[in-house]
Image (cartoon, grey):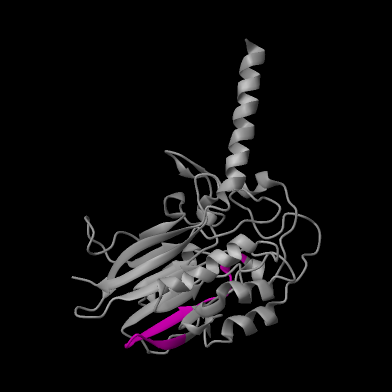
Amino acid sequence: MIGRLAGTAALSAVGGLAWAVTETRLFTVRTHVVPVLAPGSRPLRVLHVSDLHLTPTQRLKQEWVRRLADLEPDLVVSTGDNLAHQRAVPSLAHALGELLTVPGVFVLGSNDYYAPQPKNPARYLMPSSRRSTTSDEPQTLPTDELVEVLSSGGWLDLTNTRGSLDVAGQRLSFVGVDDPHLERDHFPAPDGEHGDLHVGVSHAPYTRVLDQMADDGCGVILAGHTHGGQLRVPGYGALVTNCDLDRERASGLHGWPGPRPDAPGGGSSAWLNVSAGMGTSPYTPVRFACRPEVSLLQLVAGE
């Protein structure tokens, strides 16, 4: 009896692991409607891409991302962690393809500066998880080459700075920070310039940065980093966020710091979209109940 139970448990574990590996290739587009524009405004389609963690051999992921241009977004926002290999920049350029010709903005994440390292996967489940958990010096990535590719079609680099773009006839202003997970964030001083919509962009959704962006008047804040928890328990959700954001907002569209003013209960907040991202570390290539994704935000007029 005990032997049969042990055998069943072992088969279940093997099956779960096989599915978790398979799920890393089940890419999907999550669509959210965001009523944030001024009355009478033309709707905008915003493609939010994050955490590709790309390697040169990931051809399926590259071609799937390349086809995202068929969604015809008005704006592309990249929230970092593009790379997982020193020679992945040409692969990223191929994957982004025509998206680089669409108006866009970007910030960088830790895996745009440093290559992933082997580590104990259990450390990810600890609240204090930070950067490398090994004693080895992290290997640097070709960040300058990456920024050159991302900027090649006119995307704005929002690393600790502000900017603005005309998007489908509307003026959008932006504020961005460098990766808060590496504590490289320095919130830029106000400049008094807000467009028809003010947008905050960060790789990791640390609460200190989200608070600064909400206080700055952002109507929408976009971030990644969490992988949606990467390993989710059905009925429970994400186990961790790998930052100080609560588990309930590990991915998807929410209010920050509280409910939206048009939601039951009232309150004043920005819209926060946390992308579960598209990739994993090459050393932990699994996702469970958390498909790799990009977000398509349909910005519409509010009431």
Q: Residue at point 24% right, 80% down?
A: 41
User: In this view of the protein, which residue sits in the foreground, 269 or 146?
Assistant: 146
Image quarter in which the N terminus is found: top right
Q: Residue at point 34% right, 85% down?
A: 168
Left or right: residue 292 versus residue 254 is right
For this orientation, the residue located farthest to the right is 136
Decide whether residue 251 is among the magenta residues.
no
Q: Residue at point 74% right, 70% down?
A: 86
Residue 20: quarter of image: top right
User: In this view of the protein, which residue sits in the foreground, 175 or 73?
Assistant: 73
Q: Where is residue 78 in the image (x, y as percent from the top left)?
A: 52, 73
Q: Position of residue 66 (x, y in %)?
A: 54, 70
Residue 296: quarter of image: bottom left
Q: Is residue 214 visible?
A: no
User: In this view of the protein, which residue sits in the foreground, 125 or 37?
Assistant: 37
Decide whether residue 174 is among the magenta residues.
yes
Residue 80: quarter of image: bottom right
Q: Residue at point 58% right, 41% down?
A: 19
Image quarter in which the C terminus is found: bottom left
Q: Position of residue 131 (x, y in %)?
A: 67, 60
Left or right: residue 8 versus residue 164 is right
Left or right: residue 284 versus residue 63 is right
Q: Is residue 10 above or below residue 76?
A: above
Q: What range of the chain is rendered magenta?
A: 163-181
Number of marks drawn: 0
Q: Can residue 199 be seen in this view?
A: yes
For this orientation, the residue located farthest to the top is 1
By secondary structure, the bulk of the magenta-drawn segment is best described as strand
